[in-house]
């Protein structure tokens, strides 16, 4: 990225809290990352790691009882936390758009698909009338590969397949060429053929508009195909960010290595699937040390890991780990204990 090319999104030291019967708990803990124009940043991690909550905070759509306690969220230089609801509404669906995980809960089941999309078109372009918005909807549906779009626009959501509904959400999100598109599990529950179609539509739409994208997904194969950089979240924190190639060729955090080791591949065909032992801590049960320590083959019995490692800059990324793995030393498909023994730095092995 050139010096005169600003980031589309900069999140700095974001903390999100929630009310519980035992008092406030921290869901997202001191998260920082940025996204450049045209870039695809993938946010990965187990369920409950804070990925979706972080993006809902960016969109200003946190659920009741949840709030941003501190931090900054700058979108094209403007701190979104300083904006009122009216100003946020002007951005959402326009320059800042999101494709949600489940189209059946996003689309209104009692309104025709075309009518819903047309409303969004008019909301962010007051100069366009009803007839113009209907024409725009047909163009959008055609652009995402919906057959006979003029006729299909008159259907209700239940009359469309899951893949078609997801494409409708993409069409609506891309209607105004957003600067940033957030896609939360956009291919969940879709078969591989439809998944490929949906991702191709996203790529083509983004290429036409120059949009940056944040992709939230559990599918590491999809990450390898489409992402430029990867941010790994665990227990509400980012523990590693790297260029996508570096993440797959030489992950530095043991948790990242564990995620990769759990992916079945041709090299591991016939072997038992690896699973990271244990479970992530609840937000109220993280303690003061590294939250991954109880599950970590490297840090489980190390005194240093009883203190929380800071997120520090590394060559090409960032890392929060007292005993990082060495780049490029990971046997493909090896279980985490083998990865840990093979990849530890010599001084760590000797300790």
Image: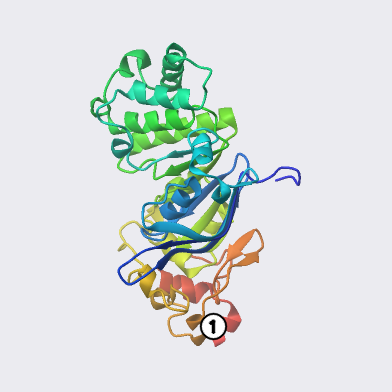
Q: How many marks?
A: 1
* Colour style of the rendered protein structure: rainbow
**245 or 268, nearer to the observer:** 245
Q: Quadrant of the rendered structure where residue 152 is?
A: top left
**Where 84 falls versus 248 (above or below)?**
above
* Residue 134 pos. (x, y %): 41, 15
Q: Residues within 10 Å of mark 1 (few under 14, many from 20)?
A: few
Residue placed at 44% from the left, 57% from the top? Answer: 67
Q: Is residue 162 left or right of residue 324?
A: left
**257 or 40, nearer to the observer:** 40
* Residue 109 pos. (x, y %): 25, 30
Q: Is residue 42 left or right of residue 2?
A: left
Q: Quadrant of the rendered structure where residue 294 is?
A: bottom left
* Residue 66 pos. (x, y %): 40, 57
- Helix, strand or loop at label 1? It is helix
The residue carrying mark 1 is 349
Q: Is residue 22 visible?
A: yes
**Where 30 falls versus 168 (above or below)?**
below
Residue placed at 36% from the left, 43% from the top? Answer: 101
Q: Is residue 314 left or right of residue 206?
A: right
Residue sitting at the far top: 131
């Amino acid at each position: 990225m050139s010096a005169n090319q600003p980031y589309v999104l900069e999140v700095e030291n974001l903390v999100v809290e929630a009310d519980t019967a035992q008092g406030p708990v921290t869901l997202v803990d001191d998260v920082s990352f940025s996204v450049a124009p045209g870039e695809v940043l993938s946010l990965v991690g187990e369920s409950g790691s804070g990925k979706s909550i972080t993006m809902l905070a960016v969109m200003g759509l946190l659920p009741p009882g949840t709030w941003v306690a501190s931090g900054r969220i700058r979108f094209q230089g403007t701190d979104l936390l300083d904006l009122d609801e009216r100003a946020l509404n002007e951005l959402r669906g326009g320059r800042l758009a999101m494709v949600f995980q489940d189209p059946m809960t996003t689309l209104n089941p009692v309104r025709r698909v075309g009518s819903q999309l047309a409303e969004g078109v008019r909301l962010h372009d007051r100069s366009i009338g009803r007839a113009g918005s209907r024409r725009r909807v047909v163009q959008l549906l055609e652009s995402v590969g919906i057959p006979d779009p003029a006729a299909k626009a008159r259907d209700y959501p239940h009359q469309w397949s899951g893949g078609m509904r997801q494409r409708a959400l993409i069409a609506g999100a891309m209607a105004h060429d957003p600067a940033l598109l957030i896609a939360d599990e956009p291919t969940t529950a879709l078969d591989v053929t439809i998944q490929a179609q949906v991702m191709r539509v996203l790529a083509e739409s983004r290429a036409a508009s120059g949009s940056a994208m944040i992709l939230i997904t559990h599918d590491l194969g999809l990450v390898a195909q489409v992402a430029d950089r990867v941010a790994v979240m665990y227990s509400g924190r980012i523990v590693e960010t790297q260029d996508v190639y570096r993440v797959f060729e030489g992950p530095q955090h043991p948790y990242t290595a564990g995620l990769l080791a759990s992916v079945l591949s041709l090299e591991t065909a016939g072997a038992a699937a690896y699973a990271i032992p244990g479970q992530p801590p609840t937000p109220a049960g993280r303690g003061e040390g590294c939250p991954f320590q109880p599950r970590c083959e490297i840090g489980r019995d190390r005194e240093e890991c009883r203190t929380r490692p800071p997120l520090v800059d590394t060559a090409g990324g960032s890392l929060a780990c007292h005993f990082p793995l060495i780049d490029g030393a990971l046997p493909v498909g090896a279980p985490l204990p083998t990865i840990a023994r093979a990849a530890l730095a010599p001084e760590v092995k000797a300790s």
